[in-house]
């Protein structure tokens, strides 16, 4: 389980540790630099064995702030570890340098490590410590700073210098993963050593392309909650901030607590029957679009659901009952859709609405039927998962948001979410946390915002707050038509398995993030088995049972 914070939150945590808990800044710096030095020592050992300390030439490229001080401190620690071919280059106005930078520069002099200003050219070297910018970068990179970053990347490209970035690769925004050097590259790190928490910029935007292998070093930060961080920020600013603040939130990865449900994922009740693991109604499909419904039902069965019934056009009956004979099928041809839906909704324990539904007038009337008072009453206490065309219909007819209830889950991709919220794709990608949390909280629902990094916003109506989780598990195999339909089925099937009995709606929020993680794991297993290019959405569905076989480290069992 990984915890993430924004760059601004990381600065707050650092300040809190120093000012409120009286942890010396230099002590935190020493531990941080030690983490970087250990990473370099491991690389040296792996590359040329135990004598690597003398053979490898290492340079540090440092700004004059605390990130640069980390780079200089790392050189001093490497000297104590036996590395001898060390050199530091700095950039910036030393008259405005931080106290920590000045201290570490004097330490270099005592250790007889060469220290000089960057003059436009770096010497050939084996390892570069990138400590130019830290988590506070908030402007475009240009001038001599851009020249230095280009020079670092030149050495990587031309002589394969190994680059270790301190906290974040220089040129990458620590909050959003934006490349602040665009149209040129930020530092292309082979590894990044970050401190205390991973940063959201490591996984959002362009961040993953530049971060390399991420290592999180424990430097002695206290265990702190988002509430405590917000209280400190309020105290610092001398004002009261209410509502969701993305910079005072500790984001957990979606595998949080998954070991606690392992037994339910791998063991089925021996006394159970097909009704024990819930009945799923899938209202989906349209003429010529049976595939989405099929994939959703297949994934639900593979994940553990007990029974599936389709409700769709008569044209799809033969197709779906041939592809998935385990499922039942009921055609919906009447114009009085509300009357047609009442009995199936009453039968079901959970409902999926939308895959392949189309955006026709008939599809609109199907979605509208869910606003019927009797249907809304029969859905109470049941998961209503809304996806795809149903979301697009709601986006065009905002009054249909009235069909949401506290057990509703929506699973939009970024384009669908842009239509739902009226926000641009750029805004949503730049801050998927606030945008998804705001929509979930406003409507009292849960949102799975699908992207290369998915955000799960789970509204807690009892405590009037929204919990956020990040899912980075997955692979390029998921970038195929139908993957979203597999996700909708996987969510319903997995929640049927891991909820407490048939009345386990109270647990679905706690487990929703785990189901998204397991779906991502199925995508990775699919890529391992076939490859990312040749995998199909149905292949991902077939891997769901194997993705559910986890040990305590979330590794697939042999």
Image: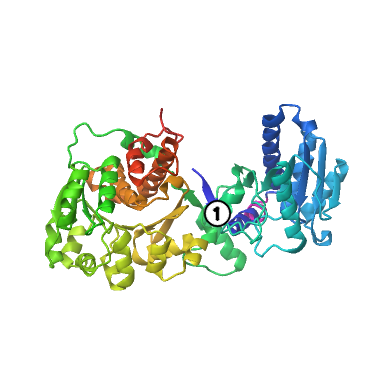
* Residue 511 appears left or right of 332: right
Q: Nearer the viewer, residue 415 or 168?
A: 415
Q: Quadrant of residue 397?
A: bottom left
Task: Please state, as top left, top right, bottom left or bottom right, where the C terminus lies in the image.
Answer: top left
Q: Position of residue 409 (x, y in %)?
A: 32, 57
Whether residue 82 can be seen here: no
Q: Quadrant of residue 66?
A: bottom right
Q: Nearer the viewer, residue 536 or 445?
A: 536
Q: Quadrant of residue 378?
A: bottom left
Q: Position of residue 355 (x, y in %)?
A: 28, 56
Colour convention? rainbow
Decide whether residue 307 is among the magenta residues.
Answer: no
Please tell me how many numbered marks the rendered image carries. Answer: 1
Q: Is residue 17 above or below residue 359?
A: above
Of helix, strand and loop, which one carries label 1? helix
Q: Main secondary structure of the magenta part?
A: helix
Q: Residue at x 52, y 48 (%)?
A: 3
Q: Position of residue 372 (x, y in %)?
A: 18, 67
Q: Which residue is mark 1?
A: 200
Q: Is residue 463 above or below residue 189?
A: below
Crowdedness of circle 1 by 10 Å Cα count: few (<14), some, many (20+)?
Answer: many
The stretch of residues the image draws in magenta is 16-22
Q: Nearer the viewer, residue 325 or 447?
A: 325
Q: Is residue 197 above or below residue 438?
A: above
Q: Position of residue 23 (x, y in %)?
A: 68, 49
Whether residue 86 can be seen here: yes
Q: Residue at x 20, y 65 (%)?
A: 366
């Amino acid at each position: 389980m990984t915890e993430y914070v924004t760059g601004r939150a990381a600065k707050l945590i650092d300040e809190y540790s120093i000012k409120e808990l009286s942890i010396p800044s230099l002590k935190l710096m020493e531990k941080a630099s030690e983490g970087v030095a250990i990473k370099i020592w491991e690389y040296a050992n792996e590359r040329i064995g135990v004598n690597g300390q003398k053979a490898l030439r290492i340079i540090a490229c440092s700004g004059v702030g605390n990130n640069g001080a980390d780079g200089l401190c790392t050189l001093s620690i490497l000297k104590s570890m036996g590395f001898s071919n060390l050199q530091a280059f700095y950039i910036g106005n030393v008259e405005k340098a931080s106290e920590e930078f000045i201290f570490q520069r004097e330490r270099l002099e005592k250790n007889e490590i060469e220290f000089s200003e960057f003059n436009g050219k770096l010497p050939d070297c084996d390892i570069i410590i990138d400590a130019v910018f830290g988590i506070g970068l908030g402007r475009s990179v240009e001038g001599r700073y851009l020249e230095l970053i280009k020079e670092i990347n030149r050495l990587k490209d031309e002589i394969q210098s190994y680059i270790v970035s301190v906290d974040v690769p220089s040129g990458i925004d620590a909050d959003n993963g934006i490349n602040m050097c665009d149209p040129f590259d930020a530092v292309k790190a082979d590894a990044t050593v970050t401190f205390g928490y991973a940063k959201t910029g490591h996984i959002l935007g362009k961040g993953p392309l530049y971060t390399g292998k991420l290592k999180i070093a424990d430097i002695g930060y206290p265990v702190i909650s988002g509430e405590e961080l917000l209280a400190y920020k309020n105290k610092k600013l001398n004002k009261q901030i209410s509502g969701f603040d993305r910079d005072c939130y500790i984001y957990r990865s979606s595998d949080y607590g998954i070991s606690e449900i392992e037994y339910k994922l791998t063991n089925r009740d021996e006394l159970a029957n097909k009704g024990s693991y819930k009945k799923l109604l899938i209202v989906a499909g349209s003429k010529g679009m049976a595939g989405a419904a099929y994939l959703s039902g297949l994934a639900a069965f593979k994940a553990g659901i007990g029974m599936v019934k389709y409700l769709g056009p008569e044209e799809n009956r033969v197709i779906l009952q041939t592809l998935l004979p385990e499922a039942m099928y009921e055609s919906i041809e009447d114009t009085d859709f509300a009357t047609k839906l009442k009995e199936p909704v009453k039968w079901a324990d959970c409902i999926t609405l939308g895959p392949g539904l189309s955006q026709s007038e008939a599809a609109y009337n199907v979605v509208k039927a869910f606003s019927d008072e009797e249907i809304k009453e029969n859905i109470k206490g049941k998961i209503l998962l809304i996806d795809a065309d149903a979301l697009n219909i709601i986006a065009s007819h905002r009054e249909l948001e009235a069909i949401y209830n506290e057990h509703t889950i929506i699973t939009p991709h970024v384009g669908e979410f842009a239509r739902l919220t009226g926000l641009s794709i750029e805004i949503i990608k730049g801050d998927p946390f606030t945008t998804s949390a705001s929509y979930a909280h406003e409507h009292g629902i849960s949102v799975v915002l699908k992207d290369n990094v998915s955000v799960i916003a789970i509204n807690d109506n009892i405590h009037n707050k929204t919990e956020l989780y990040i899912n980075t598990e997955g692979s390029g195999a998921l970038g195929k038509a139908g993957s979203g339909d597999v996700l909708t089925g996987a969510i319903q099937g997995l929640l049927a398995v891991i909820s407490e009995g048939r009345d386990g709606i109270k647990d679905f929020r706690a487990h929703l993030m785990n189901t998204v993680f397991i779906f991502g794991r199925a995508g990775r297993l699919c890529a391992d088995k076939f490859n990312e290019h040749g995998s199909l959405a149905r292949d991902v569905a077939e891997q769901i049972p194997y993705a559910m076989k986890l040990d305590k480290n979330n590794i697939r069992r042999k």
